[in-house]
Amino acid sequence: MSPAIAFRRGALAAAALLTIGAGFAGASPYLPADDAVVLERLPEKGDPALRDLKRMRAVLAAAPRNLDVAVAVARRSIDAARASGDPRYLGQAQAALSPWWSAAAPPEVVVLLRATLRQSQHDFDGALADLDGLLTANPRAVQARLTRATVLTVVGRYAEARADCSDLATVAPPLVVAGCVAAPASMSGSAEAAYAALSKVLARPGTDADAVEWTHTLAAEIAQRRGDAAAAERHYRAALLLDPTDAYLKGAYADFLLDAGRPADVLRLVGDDLRNDALLLRRVLAEQQLPDQAAPFAAHRAEMAARFEAARRRGDSLHRREEARFRLAVEGDLRGAVALARDNWKVQREAADLRILVDAARAAHDTQALQVAADWIARNGLEDAWLAAAQRASR
C-alpha cells in the first residue's frame, strides 16, 4: 500500500463502515431443511483479492505467530473493509494481530496497524497515542506521520496536522507532501493555495497511480468547496479513470452530483455496488428524487433503516453522520437528525460533518447548533461555498 493511499483511506473511509446484513442482527438463526439451499453468496466467489485473503487466512491459521503473514492478512483485511464497507474484515485484521495486540512492546508495524484500526473505530485518542509513540521512537516514520496528520485533520487540529505534513518534506515524494498539507490547509483558511499546490504537483504526477488518484480526489473536494464545479468534476473523472471501484471516491462524487441536481447520474455511478453502506445511502438519496425509482427507493430505504437500527442495537455509534443525513433527507426526522449531527460533531470535524450539522440545525431551527458551526467557520477561516450560502440564508 502506498503512503498516499493509506493517508486518504485511513481517515476518510472510516465513516462508511456499517455491518452488512445488519437488518438480521438479533434474529433467530435460520436452519434450512435442504442442504442445497443457498444461504449467502460469499464475496470471495467473484473477487480474486478476497479469494487471496481467504487463502492467506488459512496460512495464518496454521502459523498464528508468523508476524509477516499476520501483517499481510491485516493489511489485506483493512483494504477489504474499506472497499466493501463490511467491518467484519476489520475484526479479521485485529484477530490476525491478536498475539501482539496487547503486548508491552509490540513490533512497530503492529502499532501502526493498531492505530489504523483504532482510527476506524473512531478511537482517535487511542490512535494518536500509538502514533505519538512511534514518532517519538522514529521521527522519520513516513506512514506514522501521514496517518497522524490525517487523524489530526479529522478531529480539527489543523495547525498540528500541517506541522506533521511539513516534516515530511525531506522524506516523502512531493505529491504526497502536497496532498498531506492540502487537507488541513484547505480547512483552515488556505483553500486557494492548497488547490494551487495540488494542481502544480498534478502537472508532474509521477507514476504512482494510487497517489495520483488520491490527489485528484482531494483536489476535487477542495474545488467543490470553493464553488468551482467544473474543476471538481474534472478531478473526480480523472480519479475514476484510475480506480473506478474506489468506494470513497464514488461516494464523494455522488455527493457532488446530488448537489448538482443529477440523481440519474448518481444511479449510473453507484450501480448495484450496495454492500457498502455509504453507497447505498447515496443511491437512496438519488432514487428519492426520481419518480420512476419509487419501488427500488422503498426497498433500499427499508434496507438502510434496518442497517442503522441494527447498529444501534449493537451500541455502534460510528455512523452518526450518515444516519443524520438519512433521518433528515429521507425520514424527515428533524429532531433526530440534529441530535445525531451534534453528537457526531463532538467526535469528528470534517467538512461533511460540519455540513450535516448546519443542514440539520437549519431544518430543526436549532440556533445553538448553528452558532457552534458559525463559530467554527469563523475561527478556522473555512472556505466552503455551500456553507457560506447556508449561513446567508439563515440570517
Image (cartoon, helix red, strand yellow):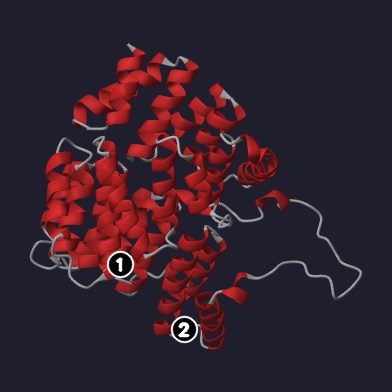
What amino acid type is highlighted by mark number 2? Arg
Closer to the camera in the image, 266 or 113: 266
Name the residue located 53 percent from the left edge and 48 percent from the top edge.
Answer: 267
View extreme (left): residue: 170
Name the residue located 81 percent from the left edge and 59 percent from the top edge.
Answer: 29
Closer to the camera in the image, 362 or 273: 273
Label 2, on which residue? 65
Q: Is residue 291 left or right of residue 164?
A: right
Tally the marks. Answer: 2
Label 1, on which residue? 210
289 shown above or below 300: above
Q: Secondary structure at mark 1?
A: helix
Name the residue located 52 percent from the left edge and 57 percent from the top edge.
Answer: 85
Name the residue located 15 percent from the left edge and 53 percent from the top edge.
Answer: 199
326 shown above or below 300: above
What amino acid type is highlighted by mark number 1? Asp
- Where is residue 161? Give x, y as percent: 20, 49
Residue 241, quarter of the rendered image: bottom left
- Where is residue 312? Give x, y as percent: 61, 42
**Labels 1 and 2: the sequence-earlier one:** 2
- Distance Cα–Cα, label 1 vs label 2: 31 Å
View extreme (right): residue: 33
Q: Is residue 160 left or right of residue 233?
A: left
Closer to the camera in the image, 88 or 125: 88
- Where is residue 285? Give x, y as percent: 54, 38
Closer to the camera in the image, 250 or 56: 250
Q: Is residue 164 visible?
A: no
Q: Is residue 305 left or right of residue 356?
A: right
- Where is residue 249? Give x, y as percent: 39, 54
Residues tagged 1 and 2 counted as in contact (Cβ below 8 A): no
Residue count near mark 1 (Cα–Cα under 10 Å), binned few <14, some 14–19, many ≥20: some
